[in-house]
């Protein structure tokens, strides 16, 4: 029985004995296959975002064209019988 041994509480991950923080790994798995999978997920998310942007742009252009068509904007602007004030 040793009277000098003192049990210490477990330290949180990333904290060294001196109290300074140590750099943690970004992922728990250092497998290159997981890095490739993460890259594929990121690329797929970026591709989906680009497609989503294109769809929204097409939607807004379609709404603008429909508004011009259904309000007969060109005839109202260029051949209106009303006189301009001035």
Image: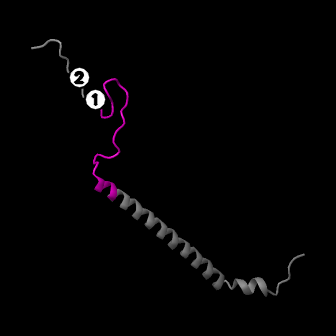
Q: Quadrant of residue 23?
A: top left
- CB atoms of marks 2 and 1 within 8 Å: yes
Question: x, y (%) of residue 2?
Answer: 12, 13
Residue matched to label 1:
11
Query: 22 or 56: nearer the eye?
Result: 22
Inter-mark Cα distance, 2 to 1: 9 Å
| Point 50% across, 73% down: residue | 55
> Quarter holding the N terminus?
top left
**Residue placed farthest to the left in the image?**
1
* Crowd tier of the residue under label 2, counting other residues whose Cα lies within 10 Å: few below 14, some 14–19, many 20 or above: few
**Residue located at (33% from left, 58% from top):** 36
Residue 76 lies in quadrant: bottom right
Front-most of residues 85 and 2? 2
Residue 85 left/right relative to 77: right
Identify the residue at horizontal 24%, vertical 25% (top origin): 9
Magenta stretch, residue numbers: 12-36
> Could you tell me residue 83's position as x and y percent?
86, 82
């Amino acid at each position: 029985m040793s009277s000098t041994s003192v049990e210490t509480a477990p330290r949180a991950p990333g904290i060294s004995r001196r109290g300074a923080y140590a750099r943690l790994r970004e992922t728990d798995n250092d497998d290159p296959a997981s890095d490739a999978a993460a890259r594929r997920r990121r690329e797929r998310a970026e591709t989906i975002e680009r497609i989503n942007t294109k769809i929204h742009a097409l939607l807004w252009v379609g709404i603008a064209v429909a508004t011009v068509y259904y309000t007969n904007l060109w005839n109202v602007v260029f051949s209106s019988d009303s006189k301009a004030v001035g």
